[in-house]
Image (spheres, rainbow, N blue to C red):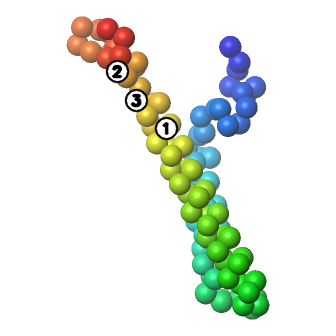
Amino acid sequence: MMSERLKPYYSRVPTKFEIAFSFVVVSIVTLMGLLILFGTFGIGSSYRVTLGLILVGYGLIRFLMLKSKYKSVKRKDMSLDEVPKEDGTNLRNP
């Protein structure tokens, strides 16, 4: 069996810090996209709309991906294989 360190990044379970850091980065990127989109920075009109929409879209897509990853981690933590019944067997494997 591969050690946790040798597993590819996409197949290992992220830590709580990594998840929190990712949510902070996504919120910053989305906020920057909104600020650019609303013209807070002195960027030309055509570039402003394009760049703003790209950053907001990236932020939303990345947020949805993080949310689904977080849900799968929570599901994996509370797997039916690990929940014991009263007679000592697991819910999935009687």
Determine contact: label 3, label 2, CB under 8 Å.
yes
Image quadrant where residue 32 sits: bottom right
Residue at 71 percent of width and 84 percent of height: 48
Instruction: Name the quadrant of the N terminus.
Output: top right
Note whether 54 is above or below 3 in the view shown.
below
Helix, strand or loop for disc 3: loop
Q: Residue furthest left?
A: 86
Real-space Cα separation, disc 1 to disc 3, in angstroms: 10 Å
Residue 93 visible in the picture:
yes
The answer to whether one can see residue 36 in this image is no
Q: Which amino acid is tagged 2? A: Val
Q: Earlier in the sequence, mark 1 or mark 3?
A: 1
Q: Is residue 52 above or below residue 16?
A: below
Q: Nearer the viewer, residue 76 or 3?
A: 76
Q: Is residue 60 left or right of residue 87?
A: right
Look at discs 1 and 3 and give the one toward the viewer.
1
Q: What residue is disc 3 on?
A: 78
- Residue 83 bears which disc, if any? 2
